[in-house]
Structures are given as C-alpha cells and as structure tokens.
C-alpha cells in the first residue's frame, strides 16, 4: 500500500493505493471519523462486480448502507440522473452527518461528487475509483460535475473528497477499450508536465498493455503525485492546473458533438493531444519529432488518433463554450516539447485553422 497526500489545509486527504484494498474501505472511513449513513453511488456494471464487497466492508464497520444505482454511460452524467440521486438520498434518510461513496469510473465519481457537494449544502464523500482513468485522474483533485447538452462539465463544483481508496485489482475486469482510454490521461501527464515519465511510458509499452501490476502501481502512484502537486498549487484552476487540460479543449468539443456516445473521454483526449501537438508545431513551439512521439506512443497503446469529421460551425460553437474561453479567446494548452506545457491565447477560428479540423 502506498499513500499520496493531497495537502490542502483543512481539506487535505490521502490517496491510498493498494492491491486487494477494497475490503478495508469501512475501516478507513471509520478512522477518518465519518459517521451516520453511507450511500454508495454506483452503476449496475460496477455494482455487480464490487458492490457486495463495498457494502459488506461498510456494514462491518457499523454503517447503515444504502446502494444507489445510476445508469452506466457518459450520456447519463446529466441533470436528470443527478435529480434521481438526490431523490434516493432523501428517500434513504441521509442527513448532514451522512456520507457518499462514489464506486465506479469517472462518470460515477464526477456525478456522485457533485451530489455530495450540493446535497444539504455539502456532505462528505469518498472516492473508490475502479477505472484506470479514475484512478490516475478523476478521483483526485475535487473537480465534480455533470455535462450539459451544449458542453462537457458545464455544471459543477470544486469539492474535495475525504479519501481516495484505489484498489488496482479492480482493473483486472476493466474492458480493453476503457483501459486504453485511461492510458490516454496517463500519457497526458507525461506530455504536458513530466518528460521523464513520458520516456518511462515509451519504454514500458508491453508491460502497460499486459496490465502488469508493478507497472500499474507505478504509473498510478506517479500520476496521483503529479496531480496532487498541481492541485496543491492551484486548487481552483486559476493558472497551473490548466496544464491538466492538455488535449481537452478540442477533446471536449469532439465529445460534446458526439452526443457523449461514440467517443469515450480518454479517446477524445488522445485525439485532442495529437491535434494540440500539431498546433504547437505549426506555431513553432514544438518540434515535429516531439509531436510524432506523442502520436506514436498513443498509437502503440492502441489508441486511434484520427479525428472524426465534424462540422466547422458546430465545432466553433462548442469551442466558444469551453470553460477556458474568455470573451472569444481560449487559453489553449500547448507544449514546448515533451513535458513542458505552455498556454497560448487563441481564437476558435485560429484553433481550427491550425488544427485542420472542421469540414
Ligand atoms: N474530475 C476530474 O478531474 C476528471 C478527470 C478526468 C475525467 N473525468 C471524467 O471522467 C469520465 C470518464 O471516466 P471513465 O473513463 O472512468 O468512464 P466511465 O466512468 O464511464 O467508466 C467506463 C466504463 O467502465 C465500467 N467500469 C468501471 N469500472 C469497472 C471495472 N473495474 N470493471 C469493469 N468495468 C468497469 C463502467 O461501468 C463504464 O461502462 C468523464 O465524464 C470525464 O469527463 C473527470
Ligand atoms: O483535474 C483537472 O484539472 C483536469 O483538467 C483533469 C481532466 O482530465 C478532466 O477531464 C477534467 O474534468 C476536465 O476539466 P474541465 O474543467 O475542463 O471540465
Ligand atoms: Zn480528462
């Protein structure tokens, strides 16, 4: 078991990374002083795999437990699902002393976290991430949100969990497509902020593809450390945290235009990173060789980096709604070579012209 602490004063918390650690959840919650009822928010897929273990662990620690299922899929990370989670929390008799456990991938984590941030003006929550993407990224840092038909994560709150409990063994059941999508966010850390980590990934493609436990523990720990340090510097994304949005400006626009269905988040980010690198080459900030390395690593991990055909006017509209857009200008995350992010102020039109995207 290794522990990474996110140091945020009174909102500090631990990320516990281990193998076979799910049964320790109840004891961990008790050691934090969490009291009252526990509501486990999950989806049918994850519930079938890990719901019993989590429920038993919480019950053994003395918590009355309610299980709340939301439908599986990004298209359900929305206001309607959030409403049904509030209904279930009220029906279960949850009060201000109660807490939420988010058991699942980033979709469950983002929505359950936002429910925790807003229910009775905020109750504690614990992240139990079960996808690679959620273990390396979404469970850490306190960005909680739901999507709007017009844009990703447009409604949300910064709200930190009290604990992140990662059991790497849960990755054994993760479908290959979702595993690969998680690797895209892993590559993001290397490409945007940690060049040596990027080299480590290049040198360990086979171990990554084989999901070797030692390699998984290492990448999860490194990503959590990197994210923790960025979030400690800039919890509410006034500056350096924007680096974690590398590949996301165009990625989010593509996800939105696909109706949150055909592209999963990590796949959209992979395409967004390759486009970002291309834009940086055209701006003279990044060498052709570095852009080629990013595309090659993603490709060797099995990610498709070919952008879909999208209508130019719809794309421009989606880009204007990006959260990093101010009065028609976007703070676009570029890289000056691998591991060194920069920020460029670009209009949506410039972005499209430089990326070659839009028909
Ligand atoms: N808050 C943040 O900082 C942050 C960071 C990155 C991404 N996100 C968000 O995360 C979401 C994507 O998360 P995701 O990639 O985890 O997708 P997801 O939550 O949809 O999970 C992917 C699929 O895997 C299934 N699954 C989960 N765990 C499993 C397991 N152990 N075994 C078998 N199946 C399992 C899920 O049921 C789902 O079908 C997006 O909404 C994205 O915007 C948020
Ligand atoms: O934690 C962050 O900060 C990130 O940007 C992580 C991203 O991987 C993640 O997809 C995040 O939800 C995007 O944030 P948003 O503010 O652009 O919605
Ligand atoms: Zn992301």
Image (tube, rainbow, N blue to C red):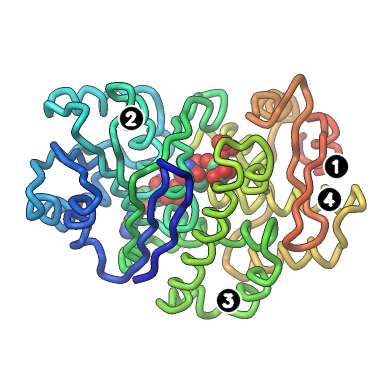
Disc on the earlier residue, 3 or 2: 2
In the image: residue 291, left or right of residue 180? right
Residue 329 position, x and y percent, is: 79, 27
Label 4 vs 2, first from the N-terminus: 2
The residue indicated by pointer 3 is 205
- 216 or 13: nearer the eye? 13
Image location of residue 70, percent across then percent down = 27, 36
Binning the other alpha carbons within 10 Å of mark 3 as few (below 14), some (14 to 19) or many (20 upward) gives: some
The earlier-in-sequence mark between 1 and 2 is 2
Q: Kindly give the residue lying farthest to the right in the view shown.
A: 284
User: Which disc is residue 354 wearing?
Assistant: 1
Q: Residues under labels 3 and 1: Cα distance?
A: 30 Å
Q: Residue at x 7, y 48 (%)?
A: 62
Q: Earlier in the sequence, mark 4 or mark 1?
A: 4
Report the quarter where the N terminus lies.
bottom left
- The image quarter in which residue 31 lies: bottom left
- Look at mark 4 in the image and give the residue it sits on: 280
Determine crowd level at label 2: few under 14, some 14-19, many 20+ residues with C-alpha closer than 10 A.
many
Left or right? Give the position of 296 relative to 168: right
Where on the picture, by quarter, is residue 337? bottom right
SS type, badge 1: helix
**Which dot marks residue 115?**
2
Visible in this render: residue 247?
no
- For mark 4, does the 10 Å Cα neighbourhood hold few (<14), some (14 to 19), or many (20 or more) residues? many
- Label 3 – label 4 distance at C-alpha: 25 Å
């Amino acid at each position: 078991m290794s522990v990474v602490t996110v140091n945020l004063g009174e909102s500090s918390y631990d990320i516990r990374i281990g193998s076979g650690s799910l049964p320790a959840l109840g004891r961990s919650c008790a050691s934090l002083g969490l009291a009252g009822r526990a509501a486990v928010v999950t989806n049918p897929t994850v519930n079938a795999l890990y719901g019993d273990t989590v429920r038993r662990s919480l019950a053994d620690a003395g918590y009355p437990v309610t299980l709340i299922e939301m439908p599986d899929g990004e298209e359900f990370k929305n206001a309607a699902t959030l409403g049904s989670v509030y209904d279930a929390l009220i029906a279960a008799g949850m009060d201000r002393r109660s807490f939420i456990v988010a058991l699942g991938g980033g979709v469950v984590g983002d929505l359950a976290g936002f429910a925790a941030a807003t229910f009775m003006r905020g109750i504690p929550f614990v992240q139990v991430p079960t996808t690679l993407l959620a273990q390396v990224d979404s469970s850490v840092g306190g960005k909680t949100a739901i999507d709007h038909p017009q844009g990703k994560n447009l409604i949300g709150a910064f709200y930190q969990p009290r604990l992140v409990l990662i059991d790497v063994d849960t990755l054994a059941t993760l479908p290959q497509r979702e595993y690969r999508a998680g690797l895209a966010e892993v590559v993001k850390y290397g490409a945007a902020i940690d060049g040596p980590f990027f080299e480590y990934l290049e040198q360990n493609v086979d171990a990554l593809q084989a999901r070797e436990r030692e390699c998984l523990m290492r990448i999860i720990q490194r990503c959590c450390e990197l994210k923790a340090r960025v979030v400690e510097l800039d919890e509410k994304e006034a500056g350096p945290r924007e680096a974690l949005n590398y590949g996301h400006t165009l990625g989010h626009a593509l996800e939105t235009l696909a109706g949150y269905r055909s592209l999963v988040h990590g796949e959209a980010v992979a395409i967004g990173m390759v486009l970002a690198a291309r834009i940086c080459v055209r701006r003279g900030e990044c060498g052709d060789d570095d852009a080629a390395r990013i595309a090659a690593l993603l490709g060797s991990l099995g990610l498709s980096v070919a952008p879909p055909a999208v209508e130019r006017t719809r794309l421009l509209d989606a880009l204007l709604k990006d959260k990093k857009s101010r009065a028609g200008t976007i703070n676009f995350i570029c890289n000056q070579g691998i591991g060194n992010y920069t920020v460029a102020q670009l209009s949506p039109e410039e972005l499209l012209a430089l990326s070659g995207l839009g028909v």
